[in-house]
Amino acid sequence: MTTERKPKSIADGGHSEIKSNEALVVGGGVAGMQAALDIANQGFKVTLLEKSPSIGGVMAQIDKTFPTLDCSACILTPKLSEVSRHPNIDLLTYSEIKSVAGATGDFRVRVHRHSRYVDEDKCSGCGDCIAVCPVEVPNKFDGNLGFRKAIYTPFPQATPNVVTVDKKGEPACRATCPAEVNAQGFVTMMRHGKFDEALEIVRRSIPFPGVLGRVCISFCEAECERGMLDESISIRNLHRFLADYERANGAPAVEAKIDKKDRVAVIGGGPGGISCAYHLARRGYPVTIFEKHEKAGGMLRYSIPEYRLPREILDEEIQRVVDMGVKIKTKTTISSIHDLFEKGFKAIFVATGAWESNRLGIHGEDSEGVVHAIKFLENVNSGKRVSVGEQVVVVGGGDAAIDSARVAMRLGAKEVTLVYRRSHVEIPAIPSEVEDAKEEGIKFMLLTNPVEILTSKGHVTGVRCVRMRLGEPDHSGRRRPVPIPNSEFTMAVDEIIVAVGQSADPRGVQNELDCSEWATVKADQVTLATNIPGVFVGGDVFTGPQTVVKAVGHGKNAAESIDRYIQGIDLMEGRAKDRHRVQSYEVDKENIPFESRMTMSKQGLSSRKRAFTEVELGFNEAAAIAEAERCLGCAVCCECERCVEACTREAIDHSLHDEVLDLHVGAIVLATGYKLFDVREYPQYGYGKIPNVITAMEYERLMNAAGPTHGHLVRLSDGKIPHSIGFVQCVGARDVQKGVPFCSRICCMYGTKLATMSKEHHPDADVTVYYADLRAFGKGFEEFYEMSRTRFGVNYVRGRVGEIMHDKKDDKVIVRFEDTETGELKNVPHDLVIISPGVQPPEGLDDLAVELNMSLNEEGYVSIHDAVLTPVDTDVSGVFVAGCADGPKDIPDSVSAGSAAAMRASIVLAKIDREE
Amino acid sequence: MANDDVKDKQVINHMPSSSFAKEVEQEFGGEGIMKCIQCGMCTASCMVASMTDRYRPRQLIQKILIGKREEVLTSDLPWLCMTCRLCEERCQEDVNLSEIFHAVREIATREGYVPKSFQNTVDKVLEDGWLLNDAYTDFIEDDRDDLGLDIDLDWNNEFVKRVKKRYIDGGKK
């Protein structure tokens, strides 16, 4: 979600025709910083826009500068603080240009400001939050060599000195869950073995980690991004493990914290009602649940068989809710909603469920031996003695049908057959339950529909069925079954269990509200408000028969609505689901090995077939951690909110969102920088495949004192000191075939610099640079090269490298080249090989060019109006260019261009000043 | 020829050039010769070079560029390229080496420099219609017969005779 801010000039009441004497500098690298400072020091206001969380650009990543071998950070850091303290510079980091309109003197720029989820005014950059963050991702600033947390500052001198939360949005698992359980959050905590914290995250959304850990349909697993790769994470079983772990290790006692006065009534003690009461109790409301059965739990207790959900689990989790201060009045039927208001309840949540079994509507349905699933399961689950026939047929394909079939098997039926009118693809029951039922010997007769129940003396003797085929898809998206003519057949049975759906009681208490023709209540989808103010509805009585987790989700949403209703806040505000859902392409799935999900251990077939003890036995600790390790962490930040707890200045707010703001400026300086060529396009060099073949930027970070090895020059594969280092030059530069025919200007010198620095780190190492031409063209460059060759003893070999091979036996990297001075073809082993990639235009420059109506040259750089006389003017008046945006440059040239562009821009601004 | 080279260098002195290089450039397939910057990528990629020290594609191109006409045309080196084109795949200047060597072979053939082994191969085909006539024995004939295949394999002899008659022996029908 994004909010919009009005531009300053319009907000101040200014007229839109007035020209602006402010400047915009795009890109906070060293060139952009120089341009911003130079304009600001002439008295004009400047906005410095930077895409990443900190200004500093590539220079901040570099270890040393050439040809003087000065510390890059030492030169840059004073500039960083100068920019951040300058009264005329407005720093906009983590922001991107969305659109540009207008002409010189009057540019309208729309900026998208990514949220850091941190209040920049409050954050002091202390880093307390970074220590507690459980998420680790490759550190982009260190060339992906090391790791950083999801909350981070890119480097110690980052400017502005505030932390940034790297959050792509809402992960698929959480977005899909009706109860919004933060699956990525608790799974991340489980990776670190922090099971108590993980359970706390689950309990933020649901009171039933153990119950839903057993019976949830787990929509999350269907959408899990890992499923696109191999198999989805076993999210349901993981939160079941958390509940089991807590039971085994003793749960801390729950304390009731009811501090509010307004009483709330909940009608129906099923999953929806208990969930609502739980969330209200968390907020401090006194809640009373009215339940008509002997015990609370609703369908969880009276429909789901014990072998799937042991009753002590359910009892304990309900008891926790009671311990929180919720009153449950069982065996109490509510006959009027209005009476509850009169008794002093301020708000009411109706979740009475759908307890009426649907009828088949065929002849013989009322005869002896035909039972309906809900009644059948209720009888079994309330402890009544139930006997079944020998030949049992279950009609239907939902969870109730599978449950009934497996219960009938356990009650002693000889043969249980499940008759379902569609195929195995459309069967709506949980797939693992279907598998278990098949294993237990239940017969599945698919694409079959009963047409008549045959009776003799009022008792069932058989069922007449017809075969079906699948026709066109119906409104539910499933293919509609069509009977095949003349395919009727008869089966001999002595009991039929009908499980073809449920519906709400048409005479139920919800009839006081505005209801649909199916006796379900009409209400708002988000707020769950009914036509009577203060009455909210959820669960099956709202949606018709659905799944447990939806009812639990309704309970949660209703609690939010009731809280708002009692406080008198608008019910709807800010609740529409508009968070960005992390898309599949945004998740990095490269280099992840195939790994199947953990299999759930189950009770043996022979012992479970006739018993009601639990079938699934749960994960052990090692299995749970291993399964949690498979999570891809789609959204990066998992919103565990440990950082929020750690922050003493209350600076972190995960509910912040992106902003759009409009700028009005007179001149624009583009200092968008460059990107390095992706050396993976040279498969012969084995980058990414051969360990110890790295790029120059990675090497730069490897040698840097603030880098992943704290400045120790070692091989990343084994931590050994490299005794022989090779540099491969001209990769992704001067290559006609790869579309980069131009010379990148800086590679020869940074290669020489890195080779020299290698010698400084390890003077005994053998360092060789492989080149085609060595271009030491600038002031002091030739001397620098000579010094590297003679004083430091770096070998320079003329010959481009044909290929790089891996000697696995000695763990060496072999470089194959022709020494063109001798004509010898050589294979030279090195411990470490550094590829020096060329420079390319940055990503997004083409989009920016379209916005500015500016042309780019063939290579993709900004084209210059006149390369000799106006080297920083683009072909759009009022837009200037600095740094590498118009072609590769080294640091001094970039800074000069920054100053030049600043001067050209200030001329434009000064003219505007004079006109006014 | 040496004089010609000097003259050419005075005209285009920023690229290595010789009359032979220009001759190759004029030949079909040899157009890319002038793009070479002698970086050695081709040799480092070459399969043949990895097997023998004699053959170095970069040095061969170099000899063409500096105009060693006689040496190149009389040598069997241009004939050793096996046209796998790995050098062309990797060449950063987009030089099409195997095409250039093909052009050089064209020139050499026109001037009668064909290495003995290549000449023998061609002669053999012209004579027998195919290359493996000497190796073809009645054992193979029996094997083919057992497999139900045609035992008569010199069907293209007639075709080769016609080609020979039309293109080599005077060109009359």
Image (spheres, grey):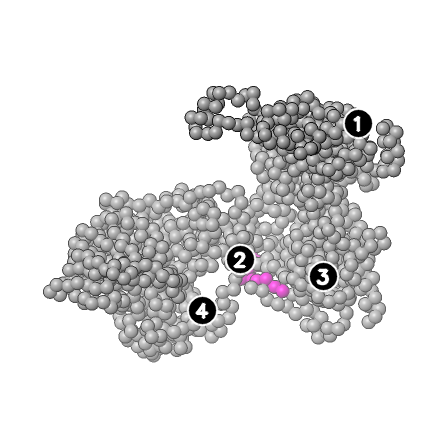
What segment carries the magenta color? A648-660
Amino acid identity at mark 4: Val
Earlier in the chain: of badge 4 and badge 2, it is 2
Which residue is rendered at x = 66% and y = 42% of the image? A697
Mark 2 touching mark 1, by CB under 8 A?
no
Give the letter of the chain under mark 4: A
Give the letter of the chain under mark 1: B
Q: At which x and y percent is residue A379? A: 21, 61
Mark 3 Cα shell of 10 Å, populated few (<14), some (14-19), many (≥20): some
Amino acid identity at mark 2: Gly
Amino acid identity at mark 1: Lys
Mark 2 Cα shell of 10 Å, populated few (<14), some (14-19), many (≥20): some
Amino acid identity at mark 3: Leu
Left or right, A437 with reference to A599 = left
| Residue A485 appears in the rendering | yes
Tell me which corner region of the image, top left, top right, bottom left or bottom right, holds residue B43: top right
The residue identified by callout 1 is: B68
